[in-house]
């Protein structure tokens, strides 16, 4: 029995790092909330809540898809371009003045369905390149990262496209005083978190990312699992593009989803999902995204310039990756 004490003591630092990685984002979020309640004027107001939810909702929806892709051992750099294409396509459909699309109801249905389908198809291109052709994920998605925004700009000849459709604009409005995009964000997180916790398919996803060769030997069709995750990631990026367009009632293909892929990866890393695959912390990703957003809000609310906020965010991502390596 005397020999067990050194073994337990040797493992205690590892347990401490694991605990910190699992709950670090939650601790940071609580600390930021307490700090803002005490020191930030008008923090506990509905306007502040709405501003933060409006800014974080598209990022978090994309981050959920990113977490699924990362769980398979991949990455998706094209989500920003995919969001730009979906949002621009929706604006183009809603701005038509002739033909069937001149009917507001038909235009609304098309604008809600077709852009998400198109975004999922773009995701399937990534999935085919990675799962079937064995192209490295960072290279495969970089192709669409470059070309996707070009496709979006072709839809409008690189011009701003505005539209008028009050029903579609409700996506950028409020429901019972809470932003609709915030409600949609919670629904997406809840559904995906339940699937990843309760279903057998989630085990296939994690097995594919943890050890693809072993997963194949166990009878899992890893290439189909990877393809499905990139399709879902693309579809969620399309939803984020629709939210951006609904808020502004206009589409600027050069700005929709710009940099959202980096924010999504940061949220995944800070939320505790290992970037090497085999795990997906959906709720942790949500907490990570909220912590990053609240940190940016806190710095700006206290007069810290935006460039310093970016540097601090980069330092947090570095710390999260370091904890994962430990």
Image (spheres, rainbow, N blue to C red):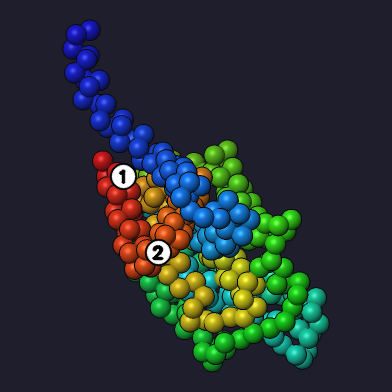
SS assignment at label 2:
loop
Q: Which mark is residue 149?
A: none
Quadrant position of residue 24? top left
Quadrant position of residue 325? top left
Left or right side of 321 for 40:
right
- Mark 2 vs mark 1: which is more N-terminal? 2
Q: Which residue is mark 2?
A: 303
Relative to 281, residue 136 above or below: below
Q: Which residue is mark 1?
A: 324
Left or right side of 227 for 210:
left
SS assignment at label 1:
helix
Residue 155 locus on image (x, y percent)? 57, 87
Residue 195 locus on image (x, y percent)? 58, 44
Give the residue drawn at x 49%, y 41%: 203
Give the residue drawn at x 30%, y 56%: 315
Q: Is residue 284 visible?
A: no
* Residue nearest the observer in this picture, 203 or 251: 251
């Amino acid at each position: 029995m005397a020999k067990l004490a050194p073994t337990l003591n040797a493992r205690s630092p590892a347990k401490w790092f694991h605990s910190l990685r699992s709950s670090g984002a939650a601790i940071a979020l609580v600390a930021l909330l307490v700090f803002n309640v005490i020191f930030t004027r008008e923090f506990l107001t509905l306007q502040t809540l709405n501003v933060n939810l409006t800014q974080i909702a598209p990022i978090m929806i994309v981050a959920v898809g990113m977490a699924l892709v990362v769980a398979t051992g991949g990455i998706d750099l094209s989500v920003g371009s995919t969001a730009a294409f979906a949002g621009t396509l929706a604006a183009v459909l809603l701005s038509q003045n002739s033909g069937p699309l001149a009917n507001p109801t038909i235009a609304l249905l098309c604008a809600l369905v077709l852009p998400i389908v198109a975004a999922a198809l773009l995701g399937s291109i990534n999935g085919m390149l990675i799962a079937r052709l064995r192209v490295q994920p960072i290279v495969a998605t970089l192709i669409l990262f470059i070309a996707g925004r070009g496709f979006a700009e072709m839809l409008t000849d690189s011009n701003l496209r505005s539209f008028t459709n009050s029903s579609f604009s409700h996506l950028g409005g409020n429901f019972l005083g809470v932003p609709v995009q915030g409600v949609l964000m919670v629904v997406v997180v809840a559904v995906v978190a339940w699937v990843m916790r309760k279903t057998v398919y989630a085990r296939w996803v994690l097995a594919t990312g943890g050890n693809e060769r072993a997963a194949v030997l166990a009878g899992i069709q890893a290439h189909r699992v990877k393809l499905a995750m990139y399709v879902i990631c693309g579809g969620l990026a399309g939803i984020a593009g629709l939210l951006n367009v609904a808020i502004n009632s206009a589409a600027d293909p050069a700005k929709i989803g710009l940099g959202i892929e980096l924010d999504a990866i940061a949220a995944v890393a800070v939320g505790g999902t290992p970037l090497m695959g085999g795990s997906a912390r959906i709720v942790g990703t949500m907490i990570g995204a909220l912590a990053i957003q609240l940190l940016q809000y806190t710095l700006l609310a206290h007069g810290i310039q935006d460039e310093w906020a970016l540097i601090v965010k980069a330092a947090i991502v570095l710390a999260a990756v370091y904890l994962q390596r430990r």
